Image: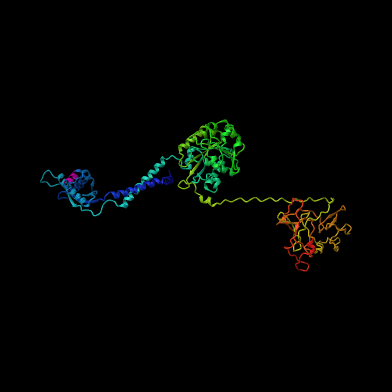
Amino acid sequence: MTIQDYLRVLREQWLVVLLAVVLGLAGAAAAFFVRPPEYTARLTMYVSSQGGDSASAAYQGAQLSQQRVTSYVELVTSLRVSEEVAQQLQLTESPEALSKQITATSALDSVLIDVAVVDADPARAAELANTVGEVFTGLVDELERPVDPAAPQAVAVRVVQPAAPPSTPSSTGLPVTLALGLLAGLAVGVGGALARNALDTSVKSPEMLRDAAGAPNLGTIAHDAQVPKRPLTVHEDPQSPRAEAFRQLRTNLQFVDVDNPNKVLVVTSAMPSEGKTTTIVNLAIALASAGSRILLIEADLRRPKAADLLGLERTAGLTSVLSGRAAAEQVIQPWGGGMFDVLASGPLPPNPSELLASRHMEEMLRELREHYDVILIDTPPLLPVTDAAAVAPATDGAILACRFKQTTRFQVETAVQALEAVSAPLLGTVFTMVPNSGPRAYAQYNSYYRSAQPITPAAPPTPVADTPRRAPEPTNARRAPVASTGPRPVAPLNGHREPAVTNGHREPVATNGHREPVPVNGHREPAPVNGHREPAPVNGHREAAPTNGHHGPTSSNGHREPASTSGLRVVASPNGHQEQAEPNGRRAVPVAPENRGGRRAAPPNSRREPSGTNGHHAPPEFEEPYDADSAHPPLPRRNTHHRSPHPGTNGTFTRPSPTARGR
């Protein structure tokens, strides 16, 4: 394990570490307040030897004293000294307990012995220390006494610094005691956390799940406390990280085998309550949202839940089809307005494993395979019952759902072995109920998903049918005069003719695709009093307008023919028949009117209605939109109250004459 692994284990087992630290601090505090304070009294003794007057004799005496010091240190804490001290002070304590209160130390190459006595009473501690020194010196004199009474003693011990009652306790204070308790608790907590992690075999990461199952992890689904209230996350909260996880599962599942797509899939788990039904329902919604034809089969014939989550009936379903009482198409129910289809479980049978392993199940799947892109089968867990293993061989593969820190490594391995026993391939695993926070948290990009607001696609533009153009007629074809059906488009103020509207753009309307102006000799002539335009001259000179405002067409010999009764110019065709013509001499070809802003452009063969004596025209206004398919377009209604001003003959604005208004 790496340092990151150890840190992650400590983060996961933080409760164990915290509990151990708290216990350590509590124990240290209790020990400090329960145990009384201790006082230490100190005594110093000097070890000497009797040497000669020469230097060599003195050196030998010093060496002897140092050798004796090591033995004397152990002799100070012996039971013999403790017994005599207890007898002299008449103590009730045992010599063994008294020996534990006495400590003796000596520095290297030193002849000094330090004696320390610890007791709860400072005066008693000093008394014990001085008694120890008195008893020990007497014991050394007894041990080092020579055989000859007249000979000098080789080694002697004297007290050079007697003990005094201490004024402050020598025991550790509260801060030090708590620090020691903290360190002790931390050490115990870390050790316990590592030991607990080593003994825990539950699956805690996608890597552990991949190693246990031997198959790729197709998706990691975050835990959501609102699942019991809204289990259809992809449908009810499509912008959440959990919904995005199901879409990621959909994408990974589509790329498991690109060359041979898997159409019939079993979704199961090792043990109950691992989220397989919720996973398969949301996966069906995600696949259907991508445009696939999906069928969800509720094959959990022991504890079915899929139909309940989707709000569908289970009175008839899979068991009805397998028992031969109904056909599949009769009991399949659509969900979500036909988003995908569901085949509910139907009445629960006493032998679900036999039904799922029957030949009818295999035939039904073979038939339904031709009508759907993906078929998802919800089955019971693998380890408690054998239903999933019974239906898995008839499918293209299985998906195993495993719950975070509940499914053990042993359970995953056993479930994989159950699928291998029936030769059912394991396509991958789904890691469910991963926490949203912590060292192994899944939802690390909540702010990113929540910041993205759903955007509704714009409606496609409504196609506008092009107006059919009339095919050109042969030059020798006879044509009857066409009566006027409406006013002509008005001319703008600048003297040029307003082009007709065609699919949103104003274009000229003519037989050759271009509109020619209507000049006579390079300038536009004003209209006569009766509102009709003079015909084009024949020999370059304009004829006087007749009293009725109409002219006959010009014949080939230069003589004017009688005017037509329709009020329009007619021209002579090469075959001797008369045809209606535009004022500019071109042949009038009817063009279907276009709708622009609620107004309709007049057909090119319509008669021009004047707006006044100045020859300008007012725009027509219709009471209802024009229907291009109608044989009788609506008649125009003139608006005399909102009329565009046009310059008159004298440079002023004039109102329409009664004659023009009557027309």
495 shown above or below 346: below
Vertical placement of 394 versus 530: above or below?
above
**Left or right: 275 as drawn, with respect to 70:** right
Depth check, front residue: 228 or 274: 228
Residue 523 seen in the current view: no
Q: Is residue 263 left or right of residue 478?
A: left
Camera-nearest residue between 246 and 620: 620
Q: How many marks?
A: 0
Quadrant showing the C terminus: bottom right
Q: Position of residue 266 (x, y in %)?
A: 54, 37
Q: How is the image coloured?
A: rainbow
The dominant secondary structure in magenta is: helix
Q: Answer with left or right where residue 147 lies relative to residue 94.
A: left
Where does the N terminus fall, quadrant-wise?
top left
Q: Is residue 637 above or below residue 113?
A: below
Residue at 12 percent across and 43 percent down: it is: 147
- The answer to if 185 sits in the magenta stretch is no
Q: Residue furthest left?
A: 150
| Segment tinted magenta in the rendering | 80-87
Q: Residue 84: image x %, image y %?
A: 17, 45
Which is nearer the eye, 26 or 200? Answer: 26
- Determine which quarter of the picture holds residue 642: bottom right
Is residue 84 a member of the stretch shown in magenta?
yes
Query: What x and y, as percent, mark residue 635?
Result: 76, 56
Residue 450 at x, y percent in the picture: 53, 51
**Can residue 205 be seen in the rendering of this structure?**
yes
